[in-house]
């Protein structure tokens, strides 16, 4: 069992870290304060292959592994958590098209998604169905060569700006077997968007409702068979959970590095803060939580790459642990900065705000426990 990265992985890691340092970190505070969705900068990331990390090469993807993706999102989040997290969503939606779309669908949508000339959003959550995703009510009724969609999706990242919406809708009876997946383009008649939500964090990406009112979508836009949509949605979330855990790890690691530096320069009572055992113990615990998170995320990513039978459970474990630990580490880093950590002159309060939602999205951490327990008890 080799825990060292190979040369190619180190190069990928270094490239992502340098991009974060040069392009994301210097701008993150402004983007957060002004709610700027940095599409042009994300297109620069796409030139490095970060828009289709695990999409096949045929239509412009990078064809890398889930472990490579974890390395990339960890490093990008050191620069800007919210922007890195949106890139993870774009990657997930693009992967779903690449994996479940036919050759015509992949040819139609993937080339522009790989350059981020077109941006993708993932639409599962509804006002009345969050954790109980299989109870979604947005409905698609077949009408000749089209489906007519009616309903509303909630809390959709990129809503109103994204060009492509991968949408889970009900085409059959109740429960997961009645759900199908469609690709809906932004200019489709009957598609509209709610007002941008006012959020605690993730201000570097828009979040709004996606509204379907007699929205007519061609049958040719359906991914896979009727009734396969819930499985498609869940398969996307395995990787999405590792990605968002990696974003927590990256943001928290940057906060930890800032705290470590600060405690070695700030003096109180005639001593550096780092000389007090209370500070040393806190830093030791933070380092341990980050290392444990990293190992769990890399293990889960490798399990998805190998199609391990426990991949869903391992992804849920890694997401639950890393997002909980990441938020606590960032909060401890803020605490070690004292009053300065609470100021927007320092990045700590922004990281704390951005990381908090990771314990909710891609399946709440309570639902992660349900997934883990279900698989453990089935053995």
Image (cartoon, helix red, strand yellow):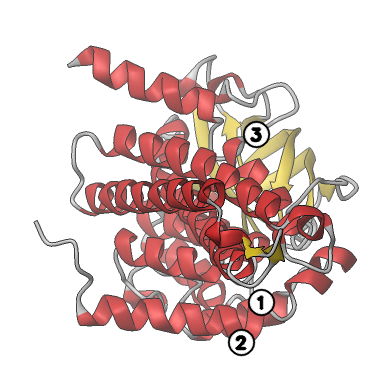
Q: Residue 198: x and y, percent?
A: 88, 46
Label 3: element kind: loop
- Find out whether the residues at labels 1 and 3 contact each other: C-beta distance under 8 Å: no
Q: Is residue 128 left or right of residue 114?
A: right
Q: Quadrant of the C terminus?
A: top left
Which residue is located at x 43 percent, y 38 percent? 321
According to the picture, the residue beneath numbered tag 1 turns out to be: 25
Callout 2 crowding tier (Cα within 10 Å): few <14, some 14–19, many ≥20: few
Task: Write down the residue under mark 2.
Answer: 22
Which image quadrant is residue 19 in? bottom right
Q: Quadrant of the N terminus?
A: bottom left
Whichever of callouts 1 and 3 sits on the residue coming sooner in the sequence is 1
Please state the horizontal and vertical placement of residue 228, each as a whole percent of the image. Answer: 41, 34
Mark 3 vs mark 2, foreground winner is 2
Q: Which mark is residue 100?
A: none
The residue that mark 3 highlights is 125
SS label for mark 2? helix
Q: Nearer the viewer, residue 18 or 304?
A: 18
Q: Is residue 54 visible?
A: no
Local packing at callout 1 (Cα closer than 10 Å; few below 14, some 14-19, many 20+) is some
- Picture quadrant of residue 238: top left
Q: Percent x, y for residue 73?
A: 48, 64
Q: Is residue 236 above or below residue 12?
A: above
CB under 8 Å between callouts 2 and 1? yes
377 horizontally vs 172: left or right: left
Query: Measured from the top left, where is residue 318 in percent x and y?
Result: 38, 41
Front of the two marks 1 and 3: 1
Pointer 3 with pointer 2, Cβ within 8 A: no
């Amino acid at each position: 069992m080799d825990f060292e990265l190979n040369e190619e992985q180190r190069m990928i890691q270094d490239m992502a870290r340098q991009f974060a340092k040069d392009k994301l970190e210097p701008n993150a505070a402004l983007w957060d304060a002004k709610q700027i969705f940095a599409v042009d900068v994300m297109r620069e990331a796409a030139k490095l292959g970060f828009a289709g990390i695990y999409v096949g090469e045929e239509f412009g993807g990078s064809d890398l592994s889930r472990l490579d993706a974890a390395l990339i999102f960890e490093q990008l989040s050191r620069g800007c958590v919210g922007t890195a997290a949106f890139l993870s969503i774009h990657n997930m939606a693009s992967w779903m098209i690449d994996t479940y779309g036919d050759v015509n669908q992949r040819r139609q949508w993937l080339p522009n998604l790989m350059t981020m000339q077109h941006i993708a959003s993932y639409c599962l959550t509804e006002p009345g169905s969050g954790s109980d995703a299989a109870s979604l009510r947005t409905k698609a009724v077949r009408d000749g060569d089209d489906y007519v969609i009616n309903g509303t999706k909630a809390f959709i990242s990129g809503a109103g700006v994204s060009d492509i919406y991968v949408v889970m809708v009900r085409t059959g009876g109740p429960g997961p077997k009645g759900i199908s997946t469609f690709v809906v383009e932004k200019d489709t008649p009957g598609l509209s968007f709610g007002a941008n939500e006012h959020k605690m964090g993730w201000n570097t990406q828009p979040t709004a409702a996606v509204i379907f009112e007699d929205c007519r979508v061609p049958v040719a836009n359906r991914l896979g068979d009727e009734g396969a949509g819930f499985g498609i949605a869940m398969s996307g979330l395995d990787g999405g959970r590792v990605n968002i855990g990696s974003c927590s790890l990256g943001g928290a690691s940057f906060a930890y590095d800032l705290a470590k530096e600060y405690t070695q320069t700030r003096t109180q009572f005639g001593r550096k803060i780092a000389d007090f055992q209370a500070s040393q113990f806190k830093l030791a615990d933070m380092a341990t939580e980050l290392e444990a998170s990293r190992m769990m995320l890399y293990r889960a990513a490798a399990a998805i790459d190998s199609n391990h039978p426990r991949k869903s459970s391992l992804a849920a474990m890694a997401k639950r642990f890393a997002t909980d630990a990441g938020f606590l580490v960032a909060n401890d880093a803020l605490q070690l900065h004292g009053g300065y950590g609470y100021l927007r002159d320092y990045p700590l309060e922004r990281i704390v705000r951005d990381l908090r939602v990771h314990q909710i999205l891609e399946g709440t951490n309570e639902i992660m426990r349900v997934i883990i327990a279900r698989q453990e008890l089935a053995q």
